[in-house]
């Protein structure tokens, strides 16, 4: 059982090491925003003539725009504005891209944003959800694996410590101390004013 | 012939290389930090894991608890503006949390309504600024909401405990990052399943980095 647990702990770590590093490094950058400030994305806008005589369905137009202008990223739900223009947005860690189609459907204003490194790290960390195509579904799957691995590391790690360490006092102090602190936080936030 | 037999015996039993003292010390330090740092981070890892899974699957309970109402008094300070007055009232009532400006409402010259929020509860406070009387509607959040809110929490205003939680989270982030690398080092040093583990790690590393490049 110890051997199996050690193997699970090790292999999960080897397989998911990059993902663990991605999430904890980007997470630290997000939490310490005063040390890692985000720069304003550089935006480039241009207007082009749109030749679209196809299906008026917004999803079909979105697919056409994606193919014609090379938009990439997670497509958001199209929005129709009050003046009749239709707004399409694709979100990607590198920067959002937007296409605004005029009410008569003859022009499209394209805006491409280029995020700085810190903004990209924020965007990578926040990327989740099983939507947006195979690329993002796969990312969400690895996100789930990494999340489950956190729980797995905690449980297998405690088991391995319990089974392989003879002098357990220091371990008990660490484990009980951290659990007691967490319990205190929960108590403070739920039971006290 | 005898020399060849002796040589075969020696070659069949390779001797373990003696580890230099420095290398052994590094291994011991890495193992100690990995082990005890890991034990310190156990509850945070579980909270991280559950909250992250919830971002994709929304399975944690989020229903709010029934509201309770109570009345309390505070020391009036009419000279304060709305922002300072609400913070003063919050502190006087021994509450902790953020006061969203967008939900601050001046009802009349003597009365103000505002909310105080923290991961565990929401308070709707109606305060009489001249009398020093506050009516509070308190609504508790579910434990699932709390777990998600603690993910990456950077502290709660007026709470030293929650500020310590924020530092604890950052400490765990650094420790897990170290543990990811030290774990690989310790596995290499242990010498178990080295070939299969190296193949797994190399493939996973290449695929992960390629995927990261593709998604960015």
Image: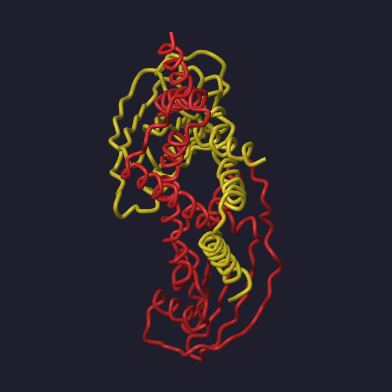
Residue A24 in the image: x percent, y percent? 43, 45
Residue A117 in the image: x percent, y percent? 31, 38
Q: Quadrant of residue B66?
A: bottom right
Near-viewer residue (A149 or A100): A149
* Residue appearing at x 68%, y 71% in the figure: B67
Instruction: Answer left or right for A172 relative to B76.
Output: right
Name of the residue lying farthest toward the top: B1
Q: Quadrant of residue B212?
A: top left
In the figure, the shade used to draw chain A is yellow
Give the chain ID for the red colour.
B
Near-viewer residue (A144 or A151): A151
Near-viewer residue (B84 or B62): B62
* Residue appearing at x 49%, y 80% in the figure: B108
Say if residue B156 shows up in the picture.
yes
Name of the residue lying farthest toward the right: B66
Say if residue A99 shows up in the picture.
no
Against A84, residue B164 (above or below) is below
Quarter of the picture containing the C terminus of chain A is bottom right
Against B204, residue A49 (above or below) is above
Number of numbered discs overlaid on the protein picture: 0
Residue A114 in the image: x percent, y percent? 32, 33
Against A189, residue A125 (above or below) is above
* Residue appearing at x 51%, y 55% in the figure: B41
Instruction: Answer left or right for B143 relative to B1.
Output: right
The colour style of the image is: by chain
Quarter of the picture containing the N terminus of chain A is top right
Near-viewer residue (A84 or A142): A142
Residue A26 in the image: x percent, y percent? 40, 43
Instruction: Answer left or right for A97 relative to B36.
Output: left
């Amino acid at each position: 059982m110890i051997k199996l647990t050690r193997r699970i702990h090790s292999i999960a770590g080897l397989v998911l090491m990059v993902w663990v590093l991605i999430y904890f490094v980007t997470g630290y950058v997000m939490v310490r925003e005063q040390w890692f400030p985000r720069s304003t994305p550089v935006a480039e806008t241009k207007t082009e003539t749109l030749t679209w005589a196809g299906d008026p369905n917004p999803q079909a137009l979105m697919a056409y725009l994606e193919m014609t202008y090379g938009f990439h990223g997670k497509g958001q739900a199209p929005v129709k504005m009050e003046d009749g223009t239709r707004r399409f947005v694709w979100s990607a860690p590198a920067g959002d891209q937007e296409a605004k189609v005029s009410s008569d459907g003859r022009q499209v204003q394209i805006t491409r944003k280029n995020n700085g490194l810190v903004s990209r790290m924020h965007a990578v960390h926040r990327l989740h959800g099983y939507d947006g195509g195979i690329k993002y579904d796969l990312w969400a799957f690895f996100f789930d694996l990494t999340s489950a691995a956190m729980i797995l590391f905690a449980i297998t790690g405690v088991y391995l410590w319990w089974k392989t360490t003879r002098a357990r006092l220091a371990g008990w102090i660490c484990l009980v101390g951290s659990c007691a602190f967490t319990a205190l936080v929960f108590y403070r936030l739920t039971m006290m004013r | 012939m005898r020399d060849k037999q002796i040589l075969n015996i020696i070659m069949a039993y390779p001797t373990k290389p003696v580890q230099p003292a420095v290398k052994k010390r590094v291994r011991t330090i890495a193992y100690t930090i990995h082990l005890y740092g890991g034990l310190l981070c156990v509850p945070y890892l579980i909270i991280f894991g559950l909250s992250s899974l919830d971002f994709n699957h929304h399975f944690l309970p989020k229903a709010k608890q029934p509201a309770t109402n109570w009345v309390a008094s505070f020391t009036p300070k009419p000279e304060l503006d709305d922002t300072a007055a609400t913070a003063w009232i919050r502190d006087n009532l021994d509450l902790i949390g953020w006061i969203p400006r967008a939900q601050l409402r001046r009802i009349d010259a003597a009365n103000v309504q505002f909310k105080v929020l923290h991961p565990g509860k929401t308070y709707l406070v109606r305060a009489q600024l001249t009398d020093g009387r506050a009516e509070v509607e308190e609504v508790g959040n579910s434990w699932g909401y709390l777990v998600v809110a603690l993910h990456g929490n950077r502290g709660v205003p007026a709470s030293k405990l929650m500020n310590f939680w924020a530092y604890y989270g950052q400490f765990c982030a650094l420790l897990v990052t170290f543990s990811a690398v030290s774990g690989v080092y310790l596995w290499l040093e242990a010498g178990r399943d080295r070939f299969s583990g190296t193949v797994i790690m190399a493939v996973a590393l290449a695929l992960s980095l390629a995927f990261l490049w593709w998604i960015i």
